[in-house]
Amino acid sequence: MSDNDTNDDEVRTDGSGGGGIVAPDDETPTWSERKQRSQGLSRLTYEYFERARREDQDLRQQSDYVERDVLAFPAWPHEMIRNLALTSFFVGMILFLSATLPPEMPNPANSAVTPAIILPDWYLYWSFGLLKLGPLNPNLAILGGAKLMADRTYGVLANVVVVGFVAIVPFINKGSARRPVEQPFWAAVGMAGVIFSLTIAALSIKNLIPMDSHLLFDLTFLVPIVAGTITYAVLKTMREGYMFDLNRRYYRLRPPK
């Protein structure tokens, strides 16, 4: 065996050589050894991405699919240092913006005056909109034209149904698809749900939208259906085209069944 072969087979701890051979965890440099290096975080980040790139490249050459159970740097301290640096940067930017552009403080609320329009925080508009589904609460002839439950109770029940559906979807859809094009139906359901959250939020502030309230009510349920149908049709078409086959070869992240 030549010296070159010996050098090629040598296990490297930084993932930058050795024909793609990756050192096991017990041979990974310790924290004290890395701390002595003068390059610092930049060198550590480079080694991380270089090692991940080589592992991915070697696995693609050796098999028809790529398993994500590959070796990487330990979570502590390598991953933690990188994530802490990124987190500190963004937190610093937020603090800088809040210091240079402080929010305008309006006049204090007057407890003796009721506001003309009472709205929750913007991220709860969808839930507030579900409380306004009174027109969908049917009048039952068997009860003499009365409603089975009050409109407020009907809206609370609608919140329970929507939240329950969102919570149960992960247990219903147990497929191994990783991209929307692989399961167009569930992708369409997700898109329809996102659009519905926006339209029902618009319904909650219908007093602020210059549109007929009846038309807005109809669009609240019609637009999500149209969006879901278009999403399903587009993704279904992509499954039969060149792009789906190309991406399937590139993103083959699990063994074939």
Image (spheres, helix red, strand yellow):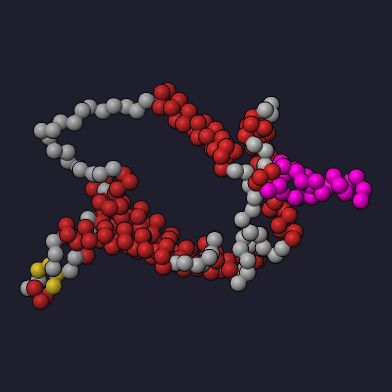
Q: Position of residue 20 (x, y in %)?
A: 75, 50
Viewer-proximal residue, 235 or 25? 25
Q: Position of residue 45 (x, y in %)?
A: 64, 37
Viewer-proximal residue, 147 or 167? 167
Q: Position of residue 249 (x, y in %)?
A: 66, 63
Numbered marks: total: 0
Residue located 90% across and 45% down the image:
3
Q: Residue lying at the far left in this picture: please name it.
A: 144
Quadrant of the rendering where the C terminus is positioned = bottom right
Q: Is residue 208 magenta?
A: no
Magenta stretch?
A: 1-24
Viewer-proximal residue, 23 or 123? 23
Q: Residue lying at the far bottom in this picture: please name it.
A: 142
Q: Residue lying at the far front in this picture: please name it.
A: 26
Q: Is residue 224 visible?
A: no
Residue located 75% across and 59% down the image:
61
Residue located 52% across and 62% down the image:
180
> In the displayed structure, would residue 165 be above or below residue 212?
below
Position of 119 with respect to 60 (left or right) is left
Q: Residue lying at the far right in this picture: please name it.
A: 2
Position of 48 with respect to 8 (left or right) is left
Q: Position of residue 21 (x, y in %)?
A: 75, 50
Residue located 37% across and 25% down the image:
102
Q: Is residue 85 visible?
A: yes
